[in-house]
Image (cartoon, rainbow, N blue to C red):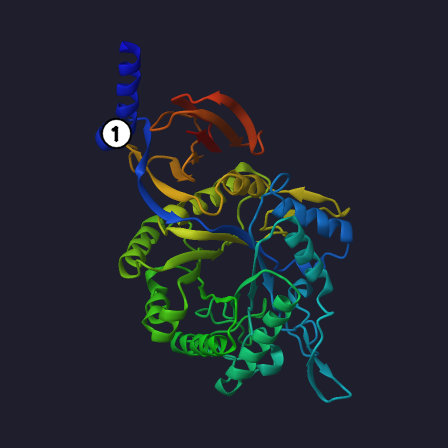
Amino acid sequence: MLKFISLLLAIIQFCLMPLNYVLGRHDILIDRATTYQTFESFGTSSCWWAQTIENDGQAREIAKLLYDDNEGLGLDVFRYNIGGGEADNPDCRIWDKSRRTESFYVFDEEKNEYVYDFTRDKNARRVLDYAVEYGAEKIILFCNSPHFSMTKSGHASGGLEEYSSNLPKENYQAFIDYVLTIADWFVSQGYPVYAISPINEPQWSWGSPDWVGQEGCHYEVNEAIELLEMFAVEMQKRGCTYRLSGPESGEMTWAHYQYVEKFFASEILNSYCDSFAGHSYWMDTKAEEKRQVGDKFKENYPDKKYEMSEWCELPLEIDSTTIDSGLRMARIITEDLTLMNAVSWQSWTAVNGDGLIDRNPDGTLKIYNRYYAFKQFTSFIKPGMVRVRVCDNFKEESTLDTVAFTDGSRYVLVIVNTAETDEKINLCGLLGKAEIYLTDATHNCEKIYEGEYEKQITVPAKSIMTVCVDM
């Protein structure tokens, strides 16, 4: 009887721990009573690589590495690029051929008009097919620019003047019809189209006589809102089964917060859209500003969600094969999940020097450290999990970043240690069977422990550690 009472008191004390526990210098406490956003998805995009994969076996291998739950990252979202057609443009200005897209919208010489040909972009569609086969449950169809035939300049690579929209207002409806026709075709073929995203980073200039690096289109904030409103109205009229996503703001800083405010100030968009999509570029050293923007977003729009829909290291300065590359990505993911309350996190490019995977000259694949850093999150934080508070007593100069999620029975804690030294911590607030996975200079998301939960943990120098505890 005394043993039973002692056990009962221990359990009660354990359950009440978050309410009265005094944190020590090296303690991390999982406060299971304080919850935040419900997580929805991880993903990546098809730019600028999917259309360049000629080999069927390699296309399948890449899709498996990205979307298979058992042998890959287990991603949920495939961002498919509806290209602006620069590969078909006789006056194309984009010097990098890999960034010239093949469009479904082509000029028929006999009919003397543009028609749709859905046999095109076959390489990218093949990768998409394999991605769906391996587990991609959501497809987001996104545009970097309208088709070049609809633009002022005759190019999808931007206007000829800086900070001037390249889409004439008289072509807004044509662009809407173009995107929705393509989206409806994908739906008719059975693809799990989750959303369309017709605008990309509207605040950047895109184009000008001097810089032409990729497809893109500038919109002043009022132009972007007007175009998205027209999309929403037309989608409602057609009864579209997919969502409208946007405006893919290029960075979530105070300088561009007006895109958030104008987006939700629109009565049409506020009622039609339940989320705002933005990118985490240029914020690698702006954690405090990210926190402030995230708090403001949550305060002003408590019923709306934030989706982080694009990030890669810009400029690319870190050797992609090193743990430093993975640490940078892991820290950004952790910040976006905690400071911005992101419900979704999607990397920009999957296959390239700034991506997760790349191709060797002999055609074989090389997997970057970023891939395994991403896997420390994607293999364990799954859709439907809820973020819980992580309490610590670390000082401001701490090298540790943390985030935790739960599905009610399993708790997942990711710890990022950017220091050159090991960190010894006491992990409090959990009890049960545990597994620990590690990515560092010598481990690639490898299981390093399985057994009873142990309170004391050593987080190796320059590492990402994921602790899973089944309560």
Q: Residue at x 76, y 86 (%)?
A: 109
- Residue farthest to the left? 20
Of 277 and 134, which appears nearest the observer? Answer: 134
Instruction: Locate the N terminus and report the quarter of the image it occupies.
Output: top left
Helix, strand or loop for disc 1 = helix
Q: Residue at x 47, y 75 (%)?
A: 236
Name the side, left or right, on which 441 lies relative to 408. right
- The percent coordinates of residue 431 (x first, y second) are 38, 25
Residue 327 seen in the figure: yes
Q: Is residue 392 above or below residue 210?
A: above
Instruction: Locate the C terminus and report the quarter of the image it occupies.
Output: top left
- The percent coordinates of residue 333 (x first, y second) are 45, 46
Of 455 and 461, which appears nearest the observer? Answer: 455
Q: Is residue 127 above or below residue 94?
A: above
Of 211 and 237, which appears nearest the observer? Answer: 237
Name the side, left or right, on which 446 lies relative to 250. right
Q: Residue at x 37, y 70 (%)?
A: 271
Of 181 and 292, which appears nearest the observer? Answer: 181
Q: Which residue position holds label 1?
A: 16
Residue 219 seen in the figure: no
The amino acid on which the numbered mark 1 sits, given as a three-letter code, is: Leu
- Dot 1, how many residues are within 10 Å of its Cα: few (below 14), some (14-19), or many (20+)? some
Q: Is residue 144 above or below residue 30?
A: below
- The percent coordinates of residue 444 (x first, y second) are 58, 33
- The percent coordinates of residue 94 (x first, y second) are 64, 70
